[in-house]
Every structure is written in structure tokens, then in C-alpha cells.
Image (cartoon, rainbow, N blue to C red):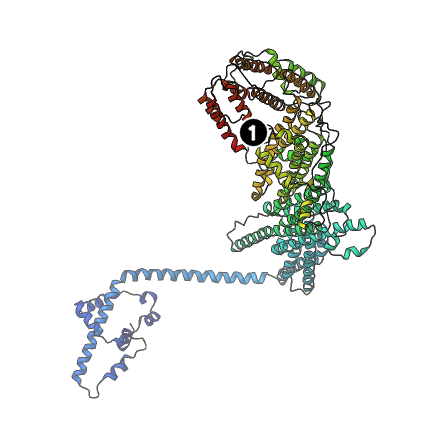
Amino acid sequence: MQKIKSLMTRQGLKSPQENIHDLSPLENFRIPSKEELRELREQPTDPQAQQEIINSIEEVYFSSDSFDIVKYELEKLPPVLSLQELEEYRDKLKQQQAAVSKKVADLILEKQPSYVKELERVTSLQTSLQLAAVICTNGRRHLSTAKEGFTQASLGLLANQRKRQLLMGLLKSLRTIKTLQQTDVRLSEMLEEEDYPGAIQLCLECQKAASTFKHYSCISELNSKLQDTLEQIEEQLDVALSKICKNFDIGHYTKVQQAYRLLGKTQTAMDQLHMHFTQAIHNTVFQVVLGYVELCAGNTDTKFQKLQYKDLCMHITSDSYIPCLADLCKALWEVMLSYYRTMEWHEKCDRGEPSSSSDGSNVMDAEETNFDRNYVKKKLEHGLSRIWQDVQLKVKTYLLGTDMSNFKYDDFIFVLDIVSRLMQVGEEFCGSKSEVLQESIRKQSVNYFKNYHRTRLEELRMFLENETWELCPVKSSFSILQLHEFKFMAQSRSPSVSPSKQPASETERTITLFEQYCNGGNPFEIQANNKDDETEDVLASNGYESDEQEKSAYQEYDSDSDVPEELKRDFVDEQTGDAPVKSISRETLRSRKRSDYCLNKVNAPILTNTTLNVIRLVGKYMQMMNILKPIAFDVIHFMSQLFDYYMYAIYTFFGRNDTFESTGLGLSSSRLRTTLNRIQESLIDLEVSSDASGTLTAVEERKEKVPTPHLSRLVVLSSSSTLYGLAERVVATESLVFLAEQFEFLQSHLDAVMPPAKKPFLQQFYSQTVSTASELRKPIYWIVAAKAIDYEQMLLLMEFEQFNRRLNEVSKKVRIPLVVSNILWEHCIRLANRTIVEGYANVKKCSNEGRALMQLDFQQFLMKLEKLTDIRPIPDKEFVETYIKAYYLTENDMERWIKEHREYSTKQLTNLVNVCLGTHINKKARQKLLAAIDDIDRPKR
């Protein structure tokens, strides 16, 4: 375009911009004339040729507006000019100029409609500008008039209004500063009211406001004062936090936590809290022990305050030991309860939800809050074991500071009960097994218990040697759980109720001590309250609990309404292999009902005062074992020695009789003999005096043994009128059986506390000792049966009737259980039957009629015997009948019979062969049979 301008200049033409200044608007934008357009159309119209001409124009013509075309062309002229070349070059330039002009004209014609339209817009704009010029002229005229109408006073009013607004802002700032200066008074009031969150909030707001007015000189001093006040608040807040350790208050602790949260020191507060708890434990135990030491010392000497806690514990007297221990545990309980409630508060109350705003700062605050909460949770959980360890060490120091070997049993049990309750607290507090406490009390308990047990064994020997074996009247409903010493078992069993009374929900759990005493009370106060709560109602009056029961007892035995139907029938199959017995009379049935010989003491347990004392002693042992389970084996071992010694005494007093045991029928079982030998070797001191020259080990072993007890001289066992002390024998033997039953009742409880490694000892004790107690009945009652009847008398049935009358006389003094009467009758019948066989063995000759008479006499004996006793089948009946039937055997059958029946003596077998000689056995057969008898007897020699 610049090239075109230059070309137009060279041709004397003006540029459009220059023509605009010279022409009016209408002339400036005229449309080309027809001649001009025609002249342009006459130019070559070949577009390709025209484009080639334009392309042949040098690039320099299109470069910039500052390009000088004339100078450029002149500089291109050769040194030697040729007119013809110049004319040719001129014609070329003209062609190029014509092509460019033709191209411009075509473009103008192409854009002519747009040009016309734009020209109209320019014309319209020109009209609008002329109107605006008129409006501006009028506006200036009016502004000039308004300027002349305003005065200087009006402008002054505006200035004063602005000044007023500035002064109002200054007054507000001054009032705020005045309020900040007076804030310390309000802060002091809020601290007195323990409104720590409000005080901190106010202080922080004041600091924020002070930073707003920091351009005032008085604010710098106020900032320093507020900072000092904030530090003072933190100090008082730490003191308030320490109060939580002894008396937790939800409202108070909530304020303290809110205050620390405002300060942004939640983690610091938790660290401080644990330090306060540790300090609280130390201060609490020291003050409690110091108070008792000063009280016992009776003076106000301050030397005790300078002692260490360990040394201070050694000044506790035995009289004040238990009250001090109880108060010590009460105080420590308050500290642990406060810690428990602190954790509970953080679990239930410290659960702030994060803000729902999407703002980045709120999200960061929520993350920081969660981090603090997790830190507090872990810190509290870790602190549980730390707090409990401090408590254990303090109590351990106290327990070991005093020698408890001289304590009374009840006092020692009370100490163990307190320590056991404290260990229960520790288990609920942090799941600890309290190894420190267990170890501190275990050794002292074992030593104390050994000395205590030794004394109790000596007392038991004294009781046994002074026991007259008279019945101790107790109610028929007597149970060892009714005794004071077993109350702890009744309490442990009380939660168990029948399925019909159990709650429907199976998710119920045992309430912990912390839950039970969370809102008040102290678990260590119960001990003293329950200690004297001792009421027993186990003794009966004259063997009866009421007169009505005494009457009803006889009425029941006079009636046969409850006799089983099979006993009323005419035929009862005893399954003995013999012919059915004859029908049983009504009187026989009534005698069977009376066979228990207990008309005046129905169902009452048979025991003595000594038995009751042993049971009470077992209860005391179990109390100690229940409280301190680590010494369970030692306690159970000592309990077994009580039973062993009682059993050995009963055997020594009533069951040992070499004369009657040598018969072979009254011998004890091998298991019973083994048990008695074991007791004698391990527990009984058979030496009369101690051997001073013995080894230390032997002396120590003898300390663990007890001398053999001796029967009281008041007990007479040689009178036939009393059936050789049958009443005393029954009371003694059945009291042992009753004691064994109580041990069996306690077996599950003992097994539950016995260490697994020691359970074989407990199983062996029950299988080889407790279960053999009832076996003592046979050797003890055998002596009575052997002495009470003269079995050599011909009128044996009369002896039995006399024995039955004496038995009834004895039953009026002591209830004779059915099992005892059966054993007595069994012994008597066996002795009678063996006496009968022995009598048959003394016969020199026996005919067939004599053999028949033997059978008839024995059947008559059995019939009358059945009226006296209800034992079925009759003991050793086959022993007599088989011997009588052997008289009818042939030679071969008799030889086989002799080899099969070794229960008969050599004398009895030999007499049988000699009596049969001449009837159906010859001399040769007799020699053969005697040789067979000799072969049988040879191993016995």
C-alpha cells in the first residue's frame, strides 16, 4: 500500500487522507465516475496475466512506508544509459502500475456496498456529535450558575461532618482501651468463680483487641500485663487440675479441659495430670501412715515427717495396722476412682465433631483436634498400669513393714481380705494380676499358716483326747454353708439362680467395683461392716426342731402308707437263685421301717463337737485359700492333714483290734490299710521323746508330725450292756463319714483353685483317703458284732433277740443309720453262719437223717432271722448250705468241689471227708481227697 502511495505521489495524486482535509465529507467519500471505471475496465482483463505482472513487482516495493522509490530506481540505473532500455523499463513499470491500479479498482468495486453503508453511519455520527456539543454547552452554563449559588458555609458544614465521624471512631477506640484497662478486675472475679474457660477467652480477646490498637503508646504496657495475667491463669489452672486426682468432679474437670483447649495445650495438660496423680499417690499414703504413727506415738514430734515412707511404715503398731491399712486402701481407691472417671469423661464427653465447613483452616483444626484426642486416649491407657504399679509398690512397702506372724486369725484374714479386694480393684482397673502384691503377701501367708496349722493340729489332738463321742444335736436342715466360716461360699453361689428366674437377656455382666461405687461409697468400708455380722442357727433342741416334729416322727413309723408295693406282695423275688421266700408279714414290714433305729432323731446328721470344730477349721482354711489363691496347694495339703488325723484317730480309738482282725473276716480292705499306713508314716509321731542327737532334717520332720491321740478314759468300750460302746462307735464313725461327705461337697471348689500341676495330689487324696472313710465301718462294727453275741451258745436265736433289744436301747441315745445297722447284722450273721459250719465240722459221724436235720435246723434259723432283720439276701447263707450239700457228693464230685471251694478251712474240709467215709467214700478215695486238701493248704503255710 505504501508503494501505491508513493506511486500516486510521483503522479501528482493525493492520498485519501489528504483529500479528506480538502474536501467536504460528501466529496471525500464520492463514488468513482463512469469514465474512470471504464478506463480501468479497458485494462487487460486476463487475471492470470495480471497476477503475473503483480508477482513480477519487486518485494522491496512492499516493504515499508519510508521506502523512497525514486532514489531506489535511480540507484539501479547503469553507469552508461541507453534510451531504448530506459523506455522498455519504463513501459514495464507502467504495466505493473496499471495492474496494481486495476487490482485496487476491482477491490473497491467489490466493497462498494459496505462503503456506502459505513458512509451513512459516519453521517449519523456527525449529527449526534453536533447534538452532544449543544448539550455540553448547556451543561456548562448550568454548572456555572450552580457554582455561583453555593456559599463557603455549606462546604464548611461538610468538613465538620467528616471531622465528627473521625472523632466518633476515636471515642470508640478510647472506650475500648478503657475497657481493656479494667479487664484485670473481671479476670480476678472469674478466677475466683473457677470460670477458667471464660477467663482465658476474655484474656485472649483482650490480647487480640490490644493488637488492633497497638499504635497507641499505652497499649504496649497493657499487652505485658495481659501476658502476665494469662500465665497466672495457667498456674491456677494447674492447681485446679491437681484437685481432680482426689475428688473428681465432672463440671470442674470440664471447665479445666475447655480452658486447656483454648490455650492449645491439651497434650501438656494430660502430661501434667499424670504427674499430679503420681504425686497424689505418694502424698496420700504418706499422710495416712503419718497420721497413725503420730497418733500412736502420742506426741506432736515432727521427726516422723522427715522419715522416708518405708521407714515410717515400720513405726505402725499391730493395733493400728489394720485400721491404717483400711484407710490406706480407701484413700488409694479414691485416687484410682478419679483416674477411672477421668477416662470415662474422655470416652463419653470428649467427642467434639469436626466442622462441616470446607474451609482449609477448619479442616486443619479438626485434624489437630483428632490428633490431640488420640494422644490423650493413648496416654490415659498407658497410665493405667503406671498408676497401679505405684499403688502396688506403696501397699507392698506397708505390708512388709510389720511382722504379722503374731496376728490373730481373724485379723490376718481381714488383712488378706483387704489385699484381695485391692487386687480385684487392680484387675478391674488395668487387667493386672498384681504380681507385686501377691508376692509380698504369699511368703508371709505361708509362714503364718504353717505356724497356725501346727497349733490347730495340737488343738485337734486335745479335742480328740477329751471327746466323749456324744451326739452334737443339729437340725436336719444343717448345712456347712450356714456356718460363719463358709459364708463366703454362700455369697459366691448367690448369683446363681434357677433358669426360670434368670433374666431373659443373656448379655448381662457382673457389675465392676468402679461401676458399683462410681457415685459414692468405698469397697473397703464393707469389710468392717460385715466382719461382726455373725448369726448361726444350726443347733436343734433335744434333737428336734419342734415338738410337732417329734410327734410326727413316731406317727410316720407307725404307718405303712409309704411302704413300696413290692414289699406288700406275697412274693418277692430276691434273685438269689433259691426258692422264693415266704410271704412277709405286716409286722416284718414295720420292723424294716424301723431298721434305721432313729425314732427320736429323724434325718439329723451325726456329728460331734470335734467334728464341727474340724469343719469350722476347714472353712477358715478355705477362706484364706479363697483370698490368696497362690497358696492354695499349701492350704489344701493342710486341710488333708486335718482329715487324715481325724480318720486315724477314729481308727485308733475304735477300729484297731488285732484279735478279731486275725480271723480274716474283719480285716480292712487293702486300700484302707495302705491309707492308714501312709497317714501313720507321714503325720503321726510315734516316738515318745525327741532325740536331741538326731539330724536337723529329722528334727524338722518331727515338727511336722503329731503324736498319736489317746481315747478319753470317760469312754467305756468294754461293757456288754452298751454293746461295747456302740453309741460312741456310731457317733465317731458316722461323724467321720459325714466329714468325708462335706469334703466331697467341697471338691469342686477345691479343684477350681488348685494349681493344675498339683491337681493329681487332690485327686489322689479323694480317691485314696476320703472315699475310704466309709470302709472304716466294717472293722469298727465287726468288733461289736464279734463281742456282743456268744456264737458258741446253742440258743443262737435268743442271742440275736437279745442283741436286737440292746440295739434298740442304744438307738434311743444315738440314731443308728440303716447302713450301720445293716453292717452290724451282716457281721453277726456272718459270724453265726461260720460258727454253724465250724460246729458241723466238729461232728464225728453223720447219717442221712442227720444231714436232713442239719438242713431243717438251718431253714428254721433263717426264717426266724428274717423277722429280726431286713437284710436280703442273708449273708453267707450259701456258705452253710453249700457245706451241708457237700455231704451228698460222690468221690469225683467231691474232689472237684474241694478244689473250687477254698473259702473253707483245712479242718472243715478234712472233717467233711472223714464223716463221709464208709457211706459213699472208701479209704482209698479218702486218702486221695486228703492229699488234694493238703495240696490246697500247702501255699498257705
Residue 825 appears left or right of 290: left
Q: Which residue lies at the image location 32% right of the left edge and 77% below the top edge?
A: 66
Q: Residue 662 at x, y = what percent?
A: 61, 30
* Relative depth, front residue between 17 and 352: 352
As drawn, 177 above or below 447: below
| Few, some or many residues within 10 Å of mark 1 (<14, 14–19, 20+) | few
Q: Is residue 465 visible?
A: yes
* Relative depth, front residue between 930 and 455: 930
Most extreme residue toward the front, as rendered? Answer: 923
- Numbered marks: total: 1
Most extreme residue toward the bottom, as rendered? Answer: 80
Most extreme residue toward the right, as rendered? Answer: 299
Q: Is residue 98 visible?
A: no
Give the image quarter of residue 1. Answer: bottom left
As drawn, 266 above or below 69: above
As drawn, 798 above or below 669: above
Give the image quarter of residue 262. Answer: bottom right
For label 1, the SS is helix
Q: Residue 629 at x, y = what percent?
A: 62, 43
As drawn, 932 above or below 390: above
Give the image quarter of residue 767. Answer: top right
* Relative depth, front residue between 94 and 902: 902
Locate the C terminus by quadrant: top right
* Relative depth, front residue between 772 and 577: 577
Q: Which residue lies at the image location 21% right of the left edge and 86% below the top edge?
A: 78
Instruction: Inspect the image, locate mark 1, and give the three-letter code of the amino acid beneath it.
Output: Pro
Q: Residue 493 at x, y = what percent?
A: 62, 33
Q: Residue 537 at x, y = what percent?
A: 71, 28
- Residue indicated by mark 1: 499
